[in-house]
Image (tube, helix red, strand yellow):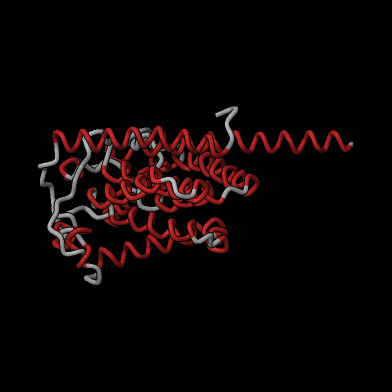
Amino acid sequence: MKEKTLEEGLRYVFFSFLIFNIANYIFFEMYYADQKRGINTIMEFLGILGYRMYFPLSSGANVFTFQLGLNALLSLYFIKIKKKNFLYIIAFWFYLFILVLADSRLILSFTIIFSFVYWLSFKTLVIFFKRYWYIISLSIIGFIFVFYNTNLFDSIKRPAERTGDVISRIDIWGHALEILVSDFKLIFGHGLNGLENSLEEGLKSRFEEQSLQTSHNFIIQNIIDFGLVGIVVILFYVFKLINMLIKIKSEIVTIMIVMFLLIGTTESIPTFYSFEATIFVIAIISVILVIHERKTTRYNQNINSVT
C-alpha cells in the first residue's frame, strides 16, 4: 500500500476480495448448492421458498457476510467515480445476492442503509454516524432485546428463534457477563476462546451444537479474552483510527469504518475468530495509515518550508 493512492489501495482490496468471493460462490454451486439448512427468512419475507446457505470457504456465517457488505459499499464507490463501469455494477448486485442467499438479515440491512447514505452523499448523516456511533450501537442492542423478547418481528425471525430453541444474542451476552464477574480474570482476561472455555459443560455442548463460539459483541469478547486492561488498549487504537479518519476526509472509508463499529455491536468483529472480516479490516486500516502518513508528511514539509 505504501506507494498507492487511496483509489489504488481500495481497488487492490476490492479485487482481492472479489476473486475470493467469486471462488467461494463457484465452489458452493459445484459441491454444496443442494444443502438445506433452515428456511431463508429474507426470501420467505419476499414470498419465495428458499434455504439459508453456508459457503464452504468461510470461517463463519456472519463473519463472512460482514466483508460482503463492505465490499458492496466499495463497489458503489467505484461506480460513483468510474461512472458507467458495468463490472462494479454487477459486483454490487452480486454481493447483495450473496447476502440474501446467506440470509444475513442485519448485515444486508446495514448494507442497504449505508449504500443510500453514501450514494446520495448525505454528509450530515455520515458525520452523525461517526460522532454518535456508540449511541447508535446502544440503540441496536435495545432493538435486539425487543426483537427476541416480543413477537413484533416474528415475520422475519427464523423458526428456531420463534420457538426459542436457538441461543439468542441476549442469552449469549447474559452468559458472557456472568463469566466476566465470576472471578478476578476480569482484569486481564481468560485468554483466547475465553467464552467457550469458561462455560459449564452442559451449556458448552449447547453452544457447540449451534456452532457458537464467541460472545457476538466486539467489546464483550475482547474483555473476556484480554480483560479490562486489554480493552482499554484496543479502544485507544480505535479512537486513534477515528482521529485519522477525520484527517484524511474520505467519505467511503469513514462509512466502512462506522459500519464496522456498528456491526461490532452484534458480532465479535474483527477478532481472532473472524478470518475474512479481520483480513478485510486490516487491509482498510493499512490504506488509512498510508494516506494519513502521507498527508501528515506533506503538512510537516509545508510547515518547514514556511518557517
Q: Nearer the viewer, residue 299 or 205?
A: 299
Residue placed at 30% from the left, 67% from the top? 146
Point out residue 28 in the picture as x, y percentages from the top left corner.
19, 37
12, above or below 264, in the image: above
Q: Quadrant of the N terminus?
A: top right
Q: Quadrant of the C terminus?
A: top right
Residue placed at 24% from the left, 48% from the top? 102
For the view shown, which residue lies furthest in the top direction?
A: 2
| In the image: residue 97, left or right of residue 210 | right
Is residue 4 at all visible to an observer of this figure? yes
Q: Quadrant of residue 165?
A: bottom left
Q: Nearer the viewer, residue 1 or 235?
A: 1
Residue placed at 28% from the left, 65% from the top? 147
140, above or below 17, in the image: below
Point out residue 216 in the picture as x, y percentages from the top left corner.
33, 48
Is residue 181 at all visible to an observer of this figure? no
Q: Nearer the viewer, residue 291 or 227?
A: 291
Residue placed at 79% from the left, 33% from the top? 301
